[in-house]
Amino acid sequence: MTDPLLRAARAIDRLSLWSGRLVAWLIVPMVLCLVWEVAARYLFMAPTVWAYDLTYMLYGTFFMLGSAYTLAKKGHIRTDTFYGDWSPRTQGIVDSLCYLLFIPALVAMLWVGWFYFQRSFLQGERIVTSPWMPIVWPFKFVIPLTAAMLLLQSLSELIKSLHAARTGHWPAGDAR
């Protein structure tokens, strides 16, 4: 694996880690919405019509956009019962095969998610089951954005996995 590819992988890792730290701040408005709703409902007997909708939309955004960060930090589930006993070369081969299967699914998610968002944006879609009727397209934009971020991070992981499969060791700073 050439140094430019590993440098590209590191740049993608930095982007994923930066975006994850930025997205983590969504927890603040989400918690504030929850606290406001609980206070309004139980202290003032005046529940809101918007807090529930905003909370679940923020949580969905937080959860989805945090996935590339989680992948960069090796936080997704894997079966360590076998994986931990394998050599770095075997780990790299298995990881490479898995990413080669995962990447087309992410391309499909990006493609379909973009059209899902675009239709929502062009129609000015709103949640009609809510009395607040918030617009939906900013939250539907999270779908293709998540797919793009995960796709980039998956490419980074594929590069590092191919390096491990070829050399028998993980790139510096990427020990499993």
Image (cartoon, grey):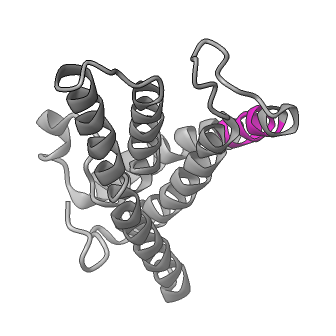
Whether residue 109 appears in magenta in the rendering, the answer is yes
Relative placement, left or right, of 30 versus 98 is left
Tell me: 139 left or right of 93.
Answer: right
Q: Residue furthest top?
A: 129
Point out the stretch of residues depicted in magenta. Answer: 108-118
Residue 77 seen by the camera: no
Q: How many marks?
A: 0
Q: Nearer the viewer, residue 27 or 104?
A: 27
Q: Residue furthest right?
A: 122
Q: Position of residue 148 (x, y in %)?
A: 62, 53
Q: Is residue 2 magenta?
A: no
Residue at the front extreme, as displayed: 44
Quadrant of the image containing the C terminus: bottom left
Residue 6 position in % (x across, y down): 46, 79
Say which residue appears at 52% left-offset and 51% top-offset. Answer: 150
Q: Position of residue 156 (x, y in %)?
A: 48, 65
- Establish if 99 lies above or below 127: below
Name the residue located 28 percent from the left edge and 37 percent from the top edge: 36
Instruction: Report the predominant secondary structure element of the magenta stretch.
Output: helix
**In this picture, is 67 found above or below 155?**
above
148 lies left or right of 169: right
Query: Could you tell whether 77 is left or right of 144 in the image?
Result: left
The quadrant holding residue 82 is: top left
